[in-house]
Image: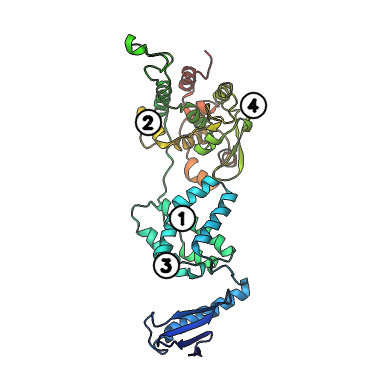
Amino acid sequence: MPFRRTDHPGVTVSRNRHGSLFARWRDPDTFKIRSTSLSKLGYSTKTKAAEWLRDKAEEIRKGRHQAALAGRKNNVDTPWETIESTYLTHFKGEHSKDAATRLERDWLRRWRKFLKLRAVRRGADLVPAHLMSFRAALGNEESLAPATRNRTLGAVRAYLTWAMDNGYVRLIGDHLRVHFKLFKAPIYQPRVLNRSELINLLEALVAHDFARHFASRTDKRAYSIGKQSPEAAPVFQPLAPFTLLALLTGARPGEVLAMKWGDIDFESRAIRVWGSKTMRERVVPLHDSPLLVRLLQALRKRAGDNVHVCGDWANDKPIELHDRQWRRVTKLAGIENAPMKCLRSTCIAHVASGSTENEYLLESRFGHGSNVSKAHYRRPLHGLSERGSTVEEWLGISGELAEAMKLLGYLAD
């Protein structure tokens, strides 16, 4: 039977030869004919399907209005697998292959699983109610921290914003703003190490970097004479260069590992740091840390052809630093709750308390926003301004730091 008009503009209904009731309409974006079985939805007559027909007619009216304002979205028929593949290719070009791999593995994994669970196969199938359901599903996962939930929401929001800009979905910006509100995350104060903890950390670093095997493959006499071979290889990868640079510059761990010799200007006493979080360059001065200058000069002599300051000497690449390596050192030092980024917060807190630099100079030097400075670092630690005029003096470990650097071979006697 031919499709007949209804009291709902834009939607027609008909029965096939088996008696099943169907609805048909024209997609406002692609201008293609769409149809669905009302019988499968549980409606046996047009009267019983009146509410569904009314909602569909209203959806079509809004779609036509939006298409008239913003233009038609010709890509809404694209499967989500193709949309995601195209987005990851775009993301890889904007950032890097590693960043795209992590995005797919860590932050889009739950969104992909959600689409499969809700049978959302095409861009056109995504409706605002799905956004609300996805956020609710994230909130019900008790194993996720609020920061992880917000990171996932942020990644999916960026993904959907790109999809909207390229005509893959029918969403608008208000849908994301209303249905993707961030979860309330607790505010943690930065972990700032005190003088005794810093001294213990320096002692642990020396012990860690000096740890060597008892013998070597070429010199196995140590087993028979009971004396350690001088040719024995180190047990662990040296962590002192990374730790001392992070502590004296206040740079983020990723920024320290990515630092290259071309970024250091010994004549003007400055380091150009590319902000891994802010995505812009800033300058860290060297004039107020003579031990940092001597450390860099010593590392430069050892670097050879390696372009990275914290480089793997065997390979022309930066070292790969894992949390378990850092936890080994903090455990040896007897320090609890001290992630790698505590080196940055320790430096910033002591420099902010000991120096006379204003907020804007501190923000420019360390690469954080004014709200972070006011909330965390503008709470002076008493007595630091009386310690001296250098970073190592404000940290209170000038003598201990020089001694540790001598033991590690970074300072001449």
Image location of residue 280, percent across then percent down? 61, 44
Where does label 3 land, which residue? 119
Pointer 1 with pointer 2, Cβ within 8 A: no
Where does label 4 land, which residue? 266
Three-letter amino acid code at disc 4? Phe
Where does label 1 land, which residue? 108
- Mark 3: few, some, or many residues within 10 Å (few <14, many ≥20)? few
- Labels 4 and 3: the sequence-earlier one: 3
Three-letter amino acid code at disc 2? Arg
> Disc 1 to disc 2, how far (Cα)?
32 Å
> Disc 4 to disc 3, how far (Cα)?
60 Å
Pointer 3 with pointer 2, Cβ within 8 A: no
Three-letter amino acid code at disc 1? Leu
Image location of residue 337, percent across then percent down? 37, 37
Q: How is the image coloured?
A: rainbow
In the depicted structure, whether residue 17 falls above or below residue 77: below
Identify the residue at image location x=53%, y=57%: 85
| Outermost residue to the top | 225
Three-letter amino acid code at disc 3? Ala
**Disc nearest the viewer among 3 and 1:** 3
Pointer 4 with pointer 3, Cβ within 8 A: no
Q: Disc number at residue 83?
A: none
Identify the residue at image location x=38%, y=16%: 215
Q: 29 or 194, which is in the foreground?
A: 29
